[in-house]
Amino acid sequence: MKKFELPELNYAYDALEPVIDARTMEIHHTKHNQAYVTNLNAALEKHPELEYESLCGLLRDINNVPSDIRQAVINNGGGAHNHKLFWKVMAPVGTTELKGDLKDAIDNAFGSYEKFVEEFSNAAKTRFGSGWAWLVLNADKQLKVMSTANQDSPLMEGFFPLLGLDVWEHAYYLNYQNRRPDYVTEWFKVINWDYVAERFEKGLTK
Ligand code: MN
Protein backbone atom coordinates (compact mmCIF):
# COMPACT_ATOMS: atom_id res chain seq x y z
CA MET A 1 0.00 0.00 0.00
CA LYS A 2 1.24 3.44 -0.92
CA LYS A 3 1.38 5.80 2.07
CA PHE A 4 0.70 9.43 1.42
CA GLU A 5 2.60 12.23 3.13
CA LEU A 6 2.02 15.87 3.93
CA PRO A 7 3.43 17.86 0.98
CA GLU A 8 6.17 20.35 1.71
CA LEU A 9 5.63 24.00 0.91
CA ASN A 10 8.31 25.59 -1.23
CA TYR A 11 7.90 28.93 0.57
CA ALA A 12 7.66 30.06 4.21
CA TYR A 13 4.33 30.36 6.03
CA ASP A 14 4.58 34.15 5.94
CA ALA A 15 5.51 34.31 2.25
CA LEU A 16 1.96 35.04 1.08
CA GLU A 17 1.35 37.95 3.46
CA PRO A 18 -0.52 40.25 3.46
CA VAL A 19 -2.95 38.21 1.36
CA ILE A 20 -2.82 35.09 3.58
CA ASP A 21 -1.34 35.45 7.07
CA ALA A 22 1.33 33.09 8.43
CA ARG A 23 -0.85 31.68 11.24
CA THR A 24 -3.61 30.70 8.82
CA MET A 25 -1.06 29.06 6.52
CA GLU A 26 0.56 27.12 9.35
CA ILE A 27 -2.70 25.78 10.80
CA HIS A 28 -4.05 25.04 7.35
CA HIS A 29 -0.97 23.06 6.38
CA THR A 30 -0.01 21.30 9.64
CA LYS A 31 -3.52 20.62 10.96
CA HIS A 32 -6.09 20.55 8.17
CA ASN A 33 -3.93 19.17 5.37
CA GLN A 34 -2.28 16.72 7.78
CA ALA A 35 -5.69 15.43 8.89
CA TYR A 36 -6.72 14.67 5.30
CA VAL A 37 -3.49 12.76 4.70
CA THR A 38 -3.74 10.82 7.98
CA ASN A 39 -7.38 9.91 7.41
CA LEU A 40 -6.72 8.91 3.80
CA ASN A 41 -3.96 6.51 4.89
CA ALA A 42 -6.21 5.11 7.64
CA ALA A 43 -9.00 4.43 5.14
CA LEU A 44 -6.65 2.77 2.63
CA GLU A 45 -5.19 0.52 5.34
CA LYS A 46 -8.53 -1.27 5.44
CA HIS A 47 -8.01 -2.44 1.85
CA PRO A 48 -4.36 -3.36 1.32
CA GLU A 49 -5.38 -5.25 -1.85
CA LEU A 50 -6.47 -2.04 -3.59
CA GLU A 51 -4.08 -1.06 -6.38
CA TYR A 52 -3.50 2.48 -7.61
CA GLU A 53 -0.56 4.28 -9.13
CA SER A 54 -1.21 7.70 -7.63
CA LEU A 55 -3.65 9.82 -5.69
CA CYS A 56 -4.82 11.23 -9.03
CA GLY A 57 -5.55 7.75 -10.32
CA LEU A 58 -7.37 6.82 -7.13
CA LEU A 59 -9.70 9.82 -7.50
CA ARG A 60 -10.19 9.46 -11.27
CA ASP A 61 -11.29 5.85 -10.76
CA ILE A 62 -13.20 6.51 -7.56
CA ASN A 63 -15.81 3.87 -8.44
CA ASN A 64 -13.12 1.20 -8.18
CA VAL A 65 -12.60 2.09 -4.53
CA PRO A 66 -14.45 -0.34 -2.23
CA SER A 67 -17.75 1.13 -1.14
CA ASP A 68 -17.02 0.95 2.59
CA ILE A 69 -14.13 3.42 2.26
CA ARG A 70 -15.24 5.30 -0.86
CA GLN A 71 -16.67 8.33 0.95
CA ALA A 72 -13.59 8.52 3.19
CA VAL A 73 -11.39 8.55 0.08
CA ILE A 74 -13.61 11.18 -1.59
CA ASN A 75 -13.32 13.41 1.49
CA ASN A 76 -9.72 12.81 2.53
CA GLY A 77 -8.13 11.80 -0.78
CA GLY A 78 -9.89 14.76 -2.35
CA GLY A 79 -8.69 16.93 0.54
CA ALA A 80 -5.12 15.67 0.18
CA HIS A 81 -5.01 16.24 -3.58
CA ASN A 82 -6.80 19.60 -3.50
CA HIS A 83 -4.40 20.98 -0.90
CA LYS A 84 -1.31 19.62 -2.62
CA LEU A 85 -2.37 21.60 -5.66
CA PHE A 86 -3.44 24.65 -3.62
CA TRP A 87 0.03 25.17 -2.10
CA LYS A 88 1.62 24.94 -5.54
CA VAL A 89 -0.68 27.36 -7.33
CA MET A 90 0.32 30.13 -4.92
CA ALA A 91 3.46 32.28 -4.80
CA PRO A 92 4.48 35.55 -3.12
CA VAL A 93 2.76 38.66 -4.48
CA GLY A 94 4.19 39.94 -7.74
CA THR A 95 6.54 37.03 -8.48
CA THR A 96 4.77 35.58 -11.52
CA GLU A 97 2.52 36.82 -14.30
CA LEU A 98 -0.04 35.34 -16.67
CA LYS A 99 1.51 35.17 -20.14
CA GLY A 100 2.07 33.04 -23.22
CA ASP A 101 -0.18 30.19 -24.32
CA LEU A 102 -2.19 30.13 -21.09
CA LYS A 103 -2.96 33.85 -21.36
CA ASP A 104 -4.12 33.37 -24.95
CA ALA A 105 -6.23 30.37 -23.96
CA ILE A 106 -7.89 32.31 -21.10
CA ASP A 107 -8.58 35.25 -23.43
CA ASN A 108 -10.12 32.88 -25.97
CA ALA A 109 -12.19 30.91 -23.47
CA PHE A 110 -13.51 33.77 -21.33
CA GLY A 111 -13.09 36.91 -23.49
CA SER A 112 -10.39 38.49 -21.30
CA TYR A 113 -8.48 38.03 -18.04
CA GLU A 114 -10.99 40.34 -16.34
CA LYS A 115 -13.91 38.20 -17.51
CA PHE A 116 -12.13 35.10 -16.24
CA VAL A 117 -11.60 36.74 -12.84
CA GLU A 118 -15.29 37.66 -12.74
CA GLU A 119 -16.43 34.12 -13.54
CA PHE A 120 -13.97 32.43 -11.18
CA SER A 121 -14.77 34.87 -8.35
CA ASN A 122 -18.45 34.28 -8.84
CA ALA A 123 -17.92 30.51 -8.56
CA ALA A 124 -15.91 31.03 -5.36
CA LYS A 125 -18.33 33.48 -3.74
CA THR A 126 -21.50 31.56 -4.57
CA ARG A 127 -20.30 28.11 -3.49
CA PHE A 128 -22.64 27.60 -0.52
CA GLY A 129 -20.87 26.32 2.59
CA SER A 130 -17.48 24.69 2.16
CA GLY A 131 -15.84 23.92 -1.15
CA TRP A 132 -13.55 25.01 -3.93
CA ALA A 133 -13.54 27.13 -7.09
CA TRP A 134 -11.61 25.74 -10.05
CA LEU A 135 -10.12 26.45 -13.43
CA VAL A 136 -10.05 23.09 -15.20
CA LEU A 137 -9.56 21.48 -18.57
CA ASN A 138 -12.48 19.36 -19.68
CA ALA A 139 -12.17 16.14 -21.71
CA ASP A 140 -12.07 18.24 -24.91
CA LYS A 141 -9.13 20.27 -23.53
CA GLN A 142 -11.26 23.39 -23.11
CA LEU A 143 -10.85 25.74 -20.14
CA LYS A 144 -13.82 25.84 -17.77
CA VAL A 145 -14.59 27.46 -14.43
CA MET A 146 -16.46 25.31 -11.93
CA SER A 147 -16.88 24.76 -8.21
CA THR A 148 -17.13 21.67 -6.06
CA ALA A 149 -18.61 21.04 -2.62
CA ASN A 150 -16.65 19.89 0.42
CA GLN A 151 -13.36 18.26 -0.74
CA ASP A 152 -14.79 16.76 -3.94
CA SER A 153 -12.09 16.66 -6.60
CA PRO A 154 -12.76 17.71 -10.21
CA LEU A 155 -10.79 14.56 -11.14
CA MET A 156 -13.79 12.46 -10.11
CA GLU A 157 -15.86 14.17 -12.80
CA GLY A 158 -13.23 13.75 -15.52
CA PHE A 159 -11.81 17.27 -15.30
CA PHE A 160 -8.12 18.15 -14.98
CA PRO A 161 -7.66 20.89 -12.35
CA LEU A 162 -5.23 23.71 -13.18
CA LEU A 163 -6.01 26.20 -10.44
CA GLY A 164 -8.02 25.75 -7.24
CA LEU A 165 -9.18 28.18 -4.58
CA ASP A 166 -10.04 26.81 -1.15
CA VAL A 167 -13.12 28.64 0.15
CA TRP A 168 -13.53 26.67 3.37
CA GLU A 169 -13.64 29.08 6.32
CA HIS A 170 -10.41 27.51 7.68
CA ALA A 171 -8.62 29.01 4.65
CA TYR A 172 -9.41 32.63 5.53
CA TYR A 173 -11.35 33.07 8.77
CA LEU A 174 -8.54 34.37 11.04
CA ASN A 175 -7.82 37.28 8.74
CA TYR A 176 -11.04 37.88 6.83
CA GLN A 177 -13.66 36.45 9.26
CA ASN A 178 -16.94 36.22 7.30
CA ARG A 179 -15.67 38.32 4.37
CA ARG A 180 -15.14 35.58 1.81
CA PRO A 181 -15.53 38.04 -1.11
CA ASP A 182 -12.55 40.10 0.15
CA TYR A 183 -10.42 36.95 0.48
CA VAL A 184 -11.35 35.92 -3.07
CA THR A 185 -10.52 39.36 -4.47
CA GLU A 186 -7.13 39.46 -2.70
CA TRP A 187 -6.25 35.86 -3.58
CA PHE A 188 -5.66 36.62 -7.27
CA LYS A 189 -2.50 38.49 -6.17
CA VAL A 190 -0.84 35.26 -5.00
CA ILE A 191 -1.59 32.99 -7.95
CA ASN A 192 1.55 31.24 -9.21
CA TRP A 193 0.90 31.63 -12.95
CA ASP A 194 4.14 29.82 -13.83
CA TYR A 195 2.88 26.69 -12.11
CA VAL A 196 -0.64 27.01 -13.56
CA ALA A 197 0.95 27.29 -17.03
CA GLU A 198 2.91 24.08 -16.33
CA ARG A 199 -0.31 22.30 -15.36
CA PHE A 200 -1.96 23.63 -18.52
CA GLU A 201 0.79 22.18 -20.75
CA LYS A 202 0.63 18.89 -18.85
CA GLY A 203 -3.15 18.73 -19.14
CA LEU A 204 -3.09 19.40 -22.89
CA THR A 205 -0.63 16.59 -23.58
CA LYS A 206 -2.16 13.94 -21.32
MN1 MN B 1 -8.31 23.78 3.20
Image (cartoon, grey):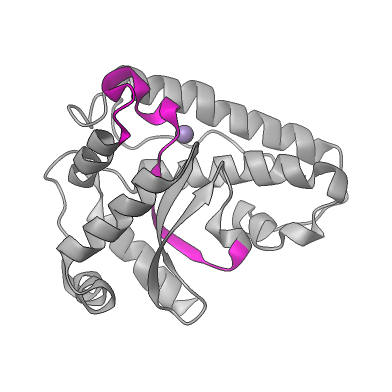
Viewer-side residue, 159 vs 123:
123
| The residue stretch that appears in magenta | 157-180
Q: Residue 39: give x, y in percent of width and height.
A: 69, 31
Does residue 143 sit above or below 58 in this rendering? below
Q: Residue 64's image quarter?
A: bottom right
Q: Residue 75: give x, y in percent of width and height.
A: 65, 41
- Residue sitting farthest toward the left: 94
Q: Residue 96: give x, y in percent of width and height.
A: 16, 52
Residue 36 forms part of the magenta stretch: no
Viewer-side residue, 172 vs 60:
172
Q: Is residue 48 visible?
A: no
Labels in figure, total: 0
Q: Residue 163's image quarter?
A: bottom left
Q: Residue at x 43, y 26 (%)?
A: 170
Could you tell me which quadrant the N terminus lies in?
A: top right
Q: Residue at x 16, y 61 (%)?
A: 114
In the image, taking residue 86 as reference, residue 22 lies left or right, namely left
Does residue 137 sit above or below 121 in this rendering? below
